[in-house]
Amino acid sequence: MNHLSMEQLLQLHGTATDVGSADARLHLNTCEACQRELDKLHQRVARLKALPTVHPPRDMWQMVERRVRSERQSRRNKWMGLAGLAIAATVTLAVVITEVSNPSELSASTAAIDTAKARSRELENVLSQYDPESRVIDGRTAKIAGDLEDRIADLDRQLQMTQMEKNVIQEEKVLRMWRERVGLLDALVDVHVTRASNVGL
Amino acid sequence: MADLLLVANSEAILARARTGDAHALEQLYRAYESQVYNLARRICRTAEDAEDVLQETFFELCRSIGQYRGEGSLWGWIRTVASSKALMRLRRNKYRDTDELEDEVSPTRREDTLLRMDLEAALERLPEVSRAVVWLHDVEGYTHEEIAEMMGKTVSFSKSQLARAHVRLRRWLGEEAVL
Protein backbone atom coordinates (compact mmCIF):
# COMPACT_ATOMS: atom_id res chain seq x y z
CA MET A 1 0.00 0.00 0.00
CA ASN A 2 1.17 3.55 -0.78
CA HIS A 3 1.67 6.06 2.00
CA LEU A 4 -1.45 7.63 3.39
CA SER A 5 -2.94 10.70 1.70
CA MET A 6 -3.76 13.82 3.67
CA GLU A 7 -7.46 12.93 3.53
CA GLN A 8 -6.71 9.53 5.05
CA LEU A 9 -4.50 11.10 7.71
CA LEU A 10 -7.29 13.54 8.55
CA GLN A 11 -9.72 10.67 8.91
CA LEU A 12 -7.33 8.91 11.26
CA HIS A 13 -6.96 12.16 13.18
CA GLY A 14 -10.74 12.49 13.33
CA THR A 15 -13.29 11.73 15.94
CA ALA A 16 -14.55 8.30 16.96
CA THR A 17 -17.18 8.38 14.22
CA ASP A 18 -14.65 9.06 11.49
CA VAL A 19 -11.52 7.11 12.26
CA GLY A 20 -10.49 6.07 8.78
CA SER A 21 -10.60 2.79 6.95
CA ALA A 22 -9.29 -0.51 8.29
CA ASP A 23 -6.68 -0.61 5.50
CA ALA A 24 -5.40 2.83 6.43
CA ARG A 25 -5.13 1.86 10.09
CA LEU A 26 -3.35 -1.32 9.18
CA HIS A 27 -0.85 0.63 7.07
CA LEU A 28 -0.33 3.15 9.84
CA ASN A 29 0.58 0.40 12.29
CA THR A 30 3.45 -0.69 10.11
CA CYS A 31 4.63 2.60 8.53
CA GLU A 32 6.82 4.91 10.59
CA ALA A 33 6.73 7.69 7.99
CA CYS A 34 2.94 7.83 8.10
CA GLN A 35 2.99 7.69 11.89
CA ARG A 36 5.29 10.75 11.85
CA GLU A 37 2.93 12.48 9.42
CA LEU A 38 -0.04 11.81 11.65
CA ASP A 39 1.89 13.04 14.64
CA LYS A 40 2.74 16.28 12.78
CA LEU A 41 -0.93 16.66 11.92
CA HIS A 42 -1.90 16.25 15.58
CA GLN A 43 0.67 18.86 16.53
CA ARG A 44 -0.41 21.27 13.79
CA VAL A 45 -4.02 21.12 14.92
CA ALA A 46 -2.97 21.55 18.55
CA ARG A 47 -0.95 24.63 17.56
CA LEU A 48 -3.90 26.02 15.62
CA LYS A 49 -6.06 25.67 18.72
CA ALA A 50 -3.38 27.37 20.79
CA LEU A 51 -3.12 30.47 18.56
CA PRO A 52 -3.67 33.61 20.63
CA THR A 53 -7.12 35.19 20.63
CA VAL A 54 -7.37 38.25 18.39
CA HIS A 55 -9.24 41.00 20.23
CA PRO A 56 -11.40 43.61 18.50
CA PRO A 57 -9.43 46.82 17.95
CA ARG A 58 -12.25 49.03 19.20
CA ASP A 59 -15.46 48.91 21.15
CA MET A 60 -18.36 48.15 18.83
CA TRP A 61 -21.13 48.05 21.44
CA GLN A 62 -22.27 51.64 20.87
CA MET A 63 -22.79 50.89 17.19
CA VAL A 64 -24.72 47.71 17.93
CA GLU A 65 -26.91 49.49 20.47
CA ARG A 66 -27.56 52.41 18.11
CA ARG A 67 -28.63 50.00 15.37
CA VAL A 68 -30.95 48.11 17.72
CA ARG A 69 -32.50 51.41 18.90
CA SER A 70 -32.94 52.58 15.34
CA GLU A 71 -34.70 49.36 14.35
CA ARG A 72 -37.00 49.58 17.36
CA GLN A 73 -37.83 53.18 16.42
CA SER A 74 -38.78 52.19 12.90
CA ARG A 75 -40.99 49.38 14.24
CA ARG A 76 -42.58 51.86 16.64
CA ASN A 77 -43.26 54.22 13.72
CA LYS A 78 -44.96 51.38 11.90
CA TRP A 79 -47.15 50.74 14.93
CA MET A 80 -48.00 54.44 15.20
CA GLY A 81 -48.98 54.34 11.53
CA LEU A 82 -51.41 51.52 12.25
CA ALA A 83 -52.83 53.40 15.22
CA GLY A 84 -53.23 56.50 13.04
CA LEU A 85 -55.14 54.47 10.52
CA ALA A 86 -57.41 53.20 13.26
CA ILE A 87 -58.12 56.74 14.46
CA ALA A 88 -58.89 57.81 10.90
CA ALA A 89 -61.31 54.91 10.61
CA THR A 90 -62.99 55.95 13.84
CA VAL A 91 -63.51 59.51 12.60
CA THR A 92 -64.80 58.28 9.25
CA LEU A 93 -67.30 55.99 10.92
CA ALA A 94 -68.56 58.75 13.16
CA VAL A 95 -69.27 60.85 10.08
CA VAL A 96 -70.92 57.97 8.25
CA ILE A 97 -73.14 57.04 11.13
CA THR A 98 -74.41 60.58 11.65
CA GLU A 99 -75.33 60.67 7.98
CA VAL A 100 -77.57 57.64 8.18
CA SER A 101 -81.17 58.61 7.46
CA ASN A 102 -83.02 57.41 10.53
CA PRO A 103 -80.93 57.93 13.67
CA SER A 104 -83.62 56.83 16.11
CA GLU A 105 -83.68 53.30 14.69
CA LEU A 106 -79.96 53.04 15.02
CA SER A 107 -79.48 54.46 18.47
CA ALA A 108 -79.10 51.09 20.20
CA SER A 109 -76.46 49.87 17.75
CA THR A 110 -74.75 53.26 17.68
CA ALA A 111 -74.38 53.05 21.43
CA ALA A 112 -72.89 49.56 21.10
CA ILE A 113 -70.46 50.82 18.44
CA ASP A 114 -69.51 53.75 20.66
CA THR A 115 -68.87 51.33 23.51
CA ALA A 116 -66.68 49.16 21.28
CA LYS A 117 -64.78 52.22 20.04
CA ALA A 118 -64.21 53.44 23.59
CA ARG A 119 -62.92 50.01 24.63
CA SER A 120 -60.72 49.96 21.53
CA ARG A 121 -59.19 53.31 22.55
CA GLU A 122 -58.62 52.09 26.11
CA LEU A 123 -56.75 49.04 24.86
CA GLU A 124 -54.66 51.16 22.52
CA ASN A 125 -53.75 53.37 25.47
CA VAL A 126 -52.69 50.32 27.47
CA LEU A 127 -50.52 49.16 24.58
CA SER A 128 -49.11 52.61 24.04
CA GLN A 129 -48.10 52.88 27.71
CA TYR A 130 -46.55 49.44 27.65
CA ASP A 131 -44.65 50.41 24.50
CA PRO A 132 -44.17 46.88 23.11
CA GLU A 133 -41.98 48.06 20.23
CA SER A 134 -39.24 49.11 22.61
CA ARG A 135 -39.00 45.58 24.00
CA VAL A 136 -37.35 42.49 22.62
CA ILE A 137 -39.70 39.51 22.51
CA ASP A 138 -39.09 35.93 21.47
CA GLY A 139 -39.78 34.81 17.93
CA ARG A 140 -43.00 32.95 18.70
CA THR A 141 -44.54 35.87 20.59
CA ALA A 142 -43.40 38.28 17.87
CA LYS A 143 -45.16 36.13 15.27
CA ILE A 144 -48.41 36.02 17.26
CA ALA A 145 -48.24 39.79 17.86
CA GLY A 146 -47.44 40.37 14.18
CA ASP A 147 -50.42 38.27 13.09
CA LEU A 148 -52.74 40.16 15.43
CA GLU A 149 -51.39 43.50 14.21
CA ASP A 150 -51.93 42.40 10.60
CA ARG A 151 -55.51 41.40 11.34
CA ILE A 152 -56.16 44.71 13.11
CA ALA A 153 -54.71 46.58 10.13
CA ASP A 154 -56.91 44.54 7.82
CA LEU A 155 -59.98 45.37 9.89
CA ASP A 156 -59.04 49.05 9.85
CA ARG A 157 -58.87 48.92 6.08
CA GLN A 158 -62.30 47.31 5.99
CA LEU A 159 -63.68 49.96 8.33
CA GLN A 160 -62.27 52.63 6.04
CA MET A 161 -63.92 50.94 3.09
CA THR A 162 -67.30 51.32 4.74
CA GLN A 163 -67.04 55.03 4.03
CA MET A 164 -67.23 54.16 0.32
CA GLU A 165 -70.41 52.22 0.81
CA LYS A 166 -72.09 54.64 3.20
CA ASN A 167 -75.34 54.48 1.31
CA VAL A 168 -75.72 50.82 2.00
CA ILE A 169 -73.96 50.70 5.30
CA GLN A 170 -75.12 48.04 7.64
CA GLU A 171 -74.73 48.88 11.25
CA GLU A 172 -74.45 45.27 12.31
CA LYS A 173 -71.47 44.81 10.05
CA VAL A 174 -69.74 47.85 11.52
CA LEU A 175 -70.51 46.75 15.04
CA ARG A 176 -69.20 43.27 14.31
CA MET A 177 -65.96 44.71 12.95
CA TRP A 178 -65.49 47.01 15.92
CA ARG A 179 -66.10 44.17 18.33
CA GLU A 180 -63.66 42.00 16.44
CA ARG A 181 -61.14 44.84 16.63
CA VAL A 182 -61.61 45.04 20.39
CA GLY A 183 -61.12 41.28 20.64
CA LEU A 184 -57.90 41.42 18.63
CA LEU A 185 -56.55 44.35 20.61
CA ASP A 186 -57.42 42.52 23.79
CA ALA A 187 -55.42 39.54 22.56
CA LEU A 188 -52.52 41.81 21.59
CA VAL A 189 -52.48 43.39 25.05
CA ASP A 190 -52.57 39.90 26.49
CA VAL A 191 -49.62 38.81 24.34
CA HIS A 192 -47.49 41.79 25.32
CA VAL A 193 -48.53 42.88 28.80
CA THR A 194 -49.65 39.62 30.42
CA ARG A 195 -46.57 37.86 29.14
CA ALA A 196 -44.46 40.59 30.70
CA SER A 197 -46.31 40.25 34.01
CA ASN A 198 -45.60 36.55 33.99
CA VAL A 199 -41.85 37.11 33.86
CA GLY A 200 -42.06 39.65 36.64
CA LEU A 201 -41.46 42.88 34.74
CA MET B 1 -13.01 36.82 31.19
CA ALA B 2 -14.19 33.76 33.13
CA ASP B 3 -16.14 36.07 35.44
CA LEU B 4 -17.76 37.79 32.48
CA LEU B 5 -18.81 34.43 31.04
CA LEU B 6 -20.25 33.30 34.35
CA VAL B 7 -22.27 36.48 34.65
CA ALA B 8 -23.42 36.32 31.03
CA ASN B 9 -24.61 32.73 31.40
CA SER B 10 -26.59 33.43 34.54
CA GLU B 11 -30.34 32.91 34.20
CA ALA B 12 -31.03 36.38 35.57
CA ILE B 13 -28.95 38.08 32.87
CA LEU B 14 -30.46 35.92 30.13
CA ALA B 15 -33.99 36.60 31.34
CA ARG B 16 -33.33 40.34 31.33
CA ALA B 17 -31.63 40.16 27.94
CA ARG B 18 -34.70 38.39 26.52
CA THR B 19 -36.86 41.36 27.51
CA GLY B 20 -34.50 43.72 25.69
CA ASP B 21 -32.73 45.10 28.76
CA ALA B 22 -29.83 47.09 27.28
CA HIS B 23 -27.54 46.57 30.26
CA ALA B 24 -27.99 42.78 30.16
CA LEU B 25 -27.40 42.73 26.40
CA GLU B 26 -24.22 44.75 26.88
CA GLN B 27 -23.02 42.22 29.46
CA LEU B 28 -23.48 39.46 26.89
CA TYR B 29 -21.53 41.57 24.40
CA ARG B 30 -18.66 42.12 26.86
CA ALA B 31 -18.52 38.41 27.65
CA TYR B 32 -18.37 37.19 24.07
CA GLU B 33 -16.98 40.03 21.95
CA SER B 34 -13.43 38.65 21.82
CA GLN B 35 -14.50 35.10 20.98
CA VAL B 36 -16.78 36.33 18.20
CA TYR B 37 -14.18 38.74 16.83
CA ASN B 38 -11.47 36.09 16.95
CA LEU B 39 -13.60 33.63 14.99
CA ALA B 40 -14.55 36.32 12.48
CA ARG B 41 -10.98 37.57 12.11
CA ARG B 42 -9.68 34.06 11.47
CA ILE B 43 -12.25 33.53 8.72
CA CYS B 44 -12.57 36.97 7.11
CA ARG B 45 -9.99 38.59 4.91
CA THR B 46 -9.78 41.94 6.67
CA ALA B 47 -10.13 43.38 10.16
CA GLU B 48 -12.94 45.61 8.83
CA ASP B 49 -14.91 42.57 7.68
CA ALA B 50 -14.39 40.95 11.09
CA GLU B 51 -15.66 44.11 12.80
CA ASP B 52 -18.76 44.02 10.60
CA VAL B 53 -19.33 40.37 11.51
CA LEU B 54 -18.95 41.24 15.20
CA GLN B 55 -21.51 44.01 14.87
CA GLU B 56 -23.95 41.93 12.82
CA THR B 57 -23.67 38.97 15.19
CA PHE B 58 -24.58 41.02 18.25
CA PHE B 59 -27.28 42.91 16.38
CA GLU B 60 -28.79 39.52 15.55
CA LEU B 61 -28.33 38.40 19.14
CA CYS B 62 -30.20 41.48 20.44
CA ARG B 63 -33.07 40.74 18.05
CA SER B 64 -33.25 36.98 18.57
CA ILE B 65 -32.05 36.23 22.09
CA GLY B 66 -35.65 35.23 22.85
CA GLN B 67 -35.23 32.26 20.54
CA TYR B 68 -32.41 30.86 22.67
CA ARG B 69 -34.12 28.35 24.93
CA GLY B 70 -31.09 27.27 26.91
CA GLU B 71 -30.67 24.07 24.93
CA GLY B 72 -26.94 23.79 24.33
CA SER B 73 -24.43 26.38 25.42
CA LEU B 74 -25.03 30.05 24.82
CA TRP B 75 -21.61 30.27 23.20
CA GLY B 76 -22.56 27.42 20.84
CA TRP B 77 -25.60 29.43 19.75
CA ILE B 78 -23.66 32.69 19.36
CA ARG B 79 -20.85 30.89 17.54
CA THR B 80 -23.25 29.48 14.97
CA VAL B 81 -24.65 32.96 14.33
CA ALA B 82 -21.12 34.40 14.04
CA SER B 83 -19.92 31.61 11.73
CA SER B 84 -22.90 32.09 9.44
CA LYS B 85 -22.33 35.84 9.31
CA ALA B 86 -18.63 35.37 8.57
CA LEU B 87 -19.32 32.85 5.79
CA MET B 88 -22.01 35.14 4.39
CA ARG B 89 -19.40 37.91 4.26
CA LEU B 90 -17.03 35.62 2.35
CA ARG B 91 -19.77 34.85 -0.16
CA ARG B 92 -20.59 38.55 -0.49
CA ASN B 93 -16.95 39.30 -1.16
CA LYS B 94 -16.96 36.61 -3.84
CA TYR B 95 -14.11 34.67 -2.37
CA ARG B 96 -11.60 33.03 -4.64
CA ASP B 97 -11.33 29.32 -4.91
CA THR B 98 -8.21 27.51 -3.79
CA ASP B 99 -6.97 26.72 -7.27
CA GLU B 100 -7.35 30.29 -8.46
CA LEU B 101 -5.11 31.45 -5.67
CA GLU B 102 -2.44 28.98 -6.64
CA ASP B 103 -2.29 30.56 -10.11
CA GLU B 104 -2.13 34.04 -8.68
CA VAL B 105 0.89 33.53 -6.48
CA SER B 106 3.61 35.82 -7.79
CA PRO B 107 7.17 34.57 -8.44
CA THR B 108 8.40 36.50 -5.42
CA ARG B 109 5.82 34.83 -3.22
CA ARG B 110 6.70 31.45 -4.67
CA GLU B 111 10.23 32.01 -3.37
CA ASP B 112 8.80 33.04 -0.03
CA THR B 113 7.13 29.70 0.27
CA LEU B 114 10.54 28.10 0.42
CA LEU B 115 11.08 29.88 3.68
CA ARG B 116 9.48 28.62 6.81
CA MET B 117 6.44 30.57 7.82
CA ASP B 118 5.00 30.69 11.25
CA LEU B 119 1.60 29.15 11.68
CA GLU B 120 -0.16 32.50 11.98
CA ALA B 121 1.24 33.72 8.64
CA ALA B 122 0.58 30.39 6.94
CA LEU B 123 -3.03 30.39 8.10
CA GLU B 124 -3.44 33.97 6.92
CA ARG B 125 -2.06 33.00 3.53
CA LEU B 126 -4.62 30.26 2.90
CA PRO B 127 -7.49 31.10 0.57
CA GLU B 128 -10.60 32.29 2.40
CA VAL B 129 -12.67 29.13 1.99
CA SER B 130 -9.85 26.79 3.00
CA ARG B 131 -9.02 28.96 5.99
CA ALA B 132 -12.66 29.01 7.05
CA VAL B 133 -12.90 25.23 6.81
CA VAL B 134 -9.65 24.75 8.78
CA TRP B 135 -10.79 27.09 11.51
CA LEU B 136 -14.33 25.79 11.79
CA HIS B 137 -13.25 22.13 11.74
CA ASP B 138 -9.95 22.03 13.57
CA VAL B 139 -10.44 24.83 16.10
CA GLU B 140 -14.17 25.34 16.58
CA GLY B 141 -14.90 21.63 16.28
CA TYR B 142 -17.64 21.69 13.65
CA THR B 143 -18.15 18.47 11.68
CA HIS B 144 -17.84 18.37 7.89
CA GLU B 145 -21.61 17.91 7.72
CA GLU B 146 -22.18 21.09 9.71
CA ILE B 147 -19.63 23.05 7.69
CA ALA B 148 -21.14 21.83 4.43
CA GLU B 149 -24.57 22.94 5.56
CA MET B 150 -23.35 26.38 6.65
CA MET B 151 -21.46 26.88 3.38
CA GLY B 152 -24.15 25.45 1.17
CA LYS B 153 -21.66 22.93 -0.19
CA THR B 154 -21.20 19.17 -0.05
CA VAL B 155 -19.48 17.20 2.68
CA SER B 156 -16.80 16.07 0.25
CA PHE B 157 -16.14 19.73 -0.63
CA SER B 158 -15.46 20.46 3.02
CA LYS B 159 -13.23 17.39 3.37
CA SER B 160 -11.20 18.16 0.27
CA GLN B 161 -10.77 21.81 1.28
CA LEU B 162 -9.43 20.71 4.65
CA ALA B 163 -7.04 18.21 3.09
CA ARG B 164 -5.72 20.73 0.56
CA ALA B 165 -5.28 23.32 3.28
CA HIS B 166 -3.27 20.91 5.43
CA VAL B 167 -1.05 19.97 2.49
CA ARG B 168 -0.30 23.67 2.03
CA LEU B 169 0.21 24.36 5.70
CA ARG B 170 2.57 21.41 5.93
CA ARG B 171 4.61 22.76 3.01
CA TRP B 172 4.66 26.36 4.19
CA LEU B 173 5.60 25.37 7.70
CA GLY B 174 8.57 23.36 6.44
CA GLU B 175 7.01 20.06 7.53
CA GLU B 176 7.08 18.59 4.05
CA ALA B 177 6.81 14.85 4.14
CA VAL B 178 9.93 12.87 3.31
CA LEU B 179 8.07 9.82 2.12
Image (cartoon, coloured by chain):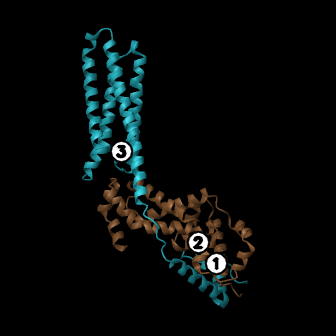
Residue A109's x, y, as percent? 27, 18
| N-term-proximal mark, 1 vs 2 | 2
Can I make out residue A31 in this image? Answer: no
**Which residue is the site of mark 2?**
B134
Residue that lies at the very extreme toward the top in this rendered image: A101
To which chain does the residue with label 1 belong? Answer: B
- Where disc 3 sits, the SS reads helix
Tell me whether circle 1 and circle 2 mark residues in contact (CB < 8 Å). yes
Q: Nearer the viewer, mark 3 or mark 2?
A: 3
To which chain does the residue with label 2 belong? Answer: B
Residue A69's x, y, as percent? 39, 50
Q: Nearer the viewer, residue A69 or B13?
A: A69
Instruction: Bin the neighbour count of mark 1 within 10 Å (Cα to Cα): few under 14, some 14-19, many 20 and up.
Output: many
Label tally: 3
**Residue sitting at x 43%, y 17%:** A164
Identify which amino acid the numbered label 3 is placed on. Answer: Glu
* Colour of chain A in the image: cyan
Image quarter of the N terminus of chain A: bottom right
Q: Nearer the viewer, mark 1 or mark 2?
A: 1
The alpha-carbon separation of the residues under discs 3 and 2 comes to 41 Å
> Which numbered circle lies on residue A133?
3
In the depicted structure, whether residue B6 falls above or below residue A143 = below
Tell me: B12 left or right of A75. left
Tell me whether circle 3 and circle 2 mark residues in contact (CB < 8 Å). no
Residue A41's x, y, as percent? 60, 82
Residue A154 sits in which quadrant? top left
- Where disc 2 sits, the SS reads helix
> Which numbered circle lies on residue B169?
1
* Colour of chain B in the image: brown
